[in-house]
Image: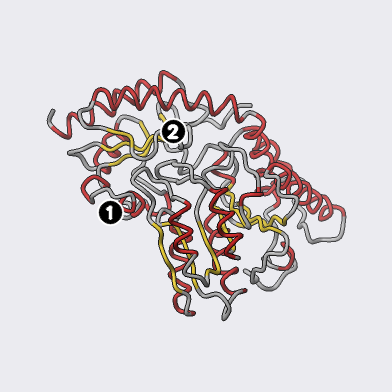
Amino acid sequence: HITGSIKMNTIYLDHAATTPLDKAVLSAMRPYLSEEFGNADSRYSLGRNASLAVLSARDKITRLICGNHGNLYFTSGGSEANSWALKGVCAANFGKKMRIILSAIEHPSLIRAAEDMAAFGFETELINPDSSGIVRPEFVEKALNRGGAAFVGVMYANNETGVIQPVNPIYELCKTAGAFYFCDCVQAAGSLPLDCTFADGISLSAHKFYGPKGVGALWLKRGAKISRLISGGQQEGGLRGGTSNVAGIVGMAEALSLACADMGNTEERVHTLRDRFADEVTSKIVGARLVGDKVSRLPSNANILFPGCRGEEIMMALDMSGVCVSTGSACSSGASKPSPVLLAMGLSEEDAAACVRFTFGRENTKEQADFAAKAVINAVKTLRGD
């Protein structure tokens, strides 16, 4: 299949922020944007066709994530799924368990949702990772031993560093403690095999794996208690009222299916490109180094520290050369403060501000990786006056 086109002369290396819509996914969505426009809750044939499309997509995604022992609810994206999971689970436990445990490297949609719950008496404990960006199970166990945990959140793979977390042992600890374990899988989906036996709940976002923006999902293990997000309709089991985004839901299922079908070949190729680029950059720029564990990380991600520079300056210089990169989470990229994720790993504010995230995708080529490496080397040397 062919990925949606990217603007001519642009080298896109920010796939952790979003991915281009796959043309095959657009084709699958197109009927539900035109002739099959029915509301999935209408009882005549147009509505039934839409309803069947949503049902089919729900079943397909559930199978792909090995989630038949739970329920899948469609949302507007990963941030909504994360926020709903935390607030909904805590609300369902109100007055019983009043502690929230999160890793300090979680997405802002979880960190800020936890902050919101303070108004209702919930206390939040943030767990720092080690210097490699890994949240060690023993760190989580220590927090669990204090008791009263309603919700524990440790993501599968970090959106800034790409570091993969030890989710299975963390889940076992949470089960023993009787705490709900939630795993943000937004960055992992489409790159790593998902098996919902490692969590009580997970989140997904279609635009991270070449699907449409504005659609995601929350999966919950059967029996998990969660409060309603949107009142007023019976959509999503009566927990999230509102007209179903049929085209987006169909596109999400198609995108995840395509990503899973070719995952091995795609990720091996992306891994090779990432290493080719990172090796060239770190060997030619004095002091430059990869941030985070070098082995336990997504194959697409190279978060690189450039001493003596500001990441934002490098990003702007590369933009002038037609290379798109970022300095951290797309959801907080307007902030000028150093990344909380990098600070939690023990980096100084100066070093955290000197990092740039490069994330490769399936449409990138060796020629683009080589051009981008040269552009980075030139930009850093110019900015540092080397």
- Please tell me whether residue 8 is drawn above or below residue 147 in the rendered image: above
**Residue at x 41% of width, y 29% of height:** 11
The residue carrying pointer 2 sits among few (fewer than 14), some (14 to 19) or many (20 or more) residues within 10 Å by Cα, namely few
In three-dimensional space, the C-alpha distance between marks 1 and 2, rounded to whole angstroms, equals 30 Å
State left or right for residue 288 relative to residue 64.
Answer: left
| Quadrant of res 319 | top left
Measuring from the top left, give residue 181's x and y in whole percent: 57, 59
**Residue at x 30% of width, y 52% of height:** 343
State left or right for residue 328 relative to residue 122.
Answer: left
Residue type marked 2: Val
- Please tell me whether residue 379 is drawn above or below residue 224 in the rendered image: above
Local SS, label 1: loop
Name the N-terminal-most of marks 1 and 2: 2
In the rendered view of the protein, which quadrant contains the C terminus?
top left
Q: Which residue is mark 2?
A: 295
The residue carrying pointer 1 sits among few (fewer than 14), some (14 to 19) or many (20 or more) residues within 10 Å by Cα, namely few
Q: Which residue is mark 1?
A: 336
Q: How many marks?
A: 2
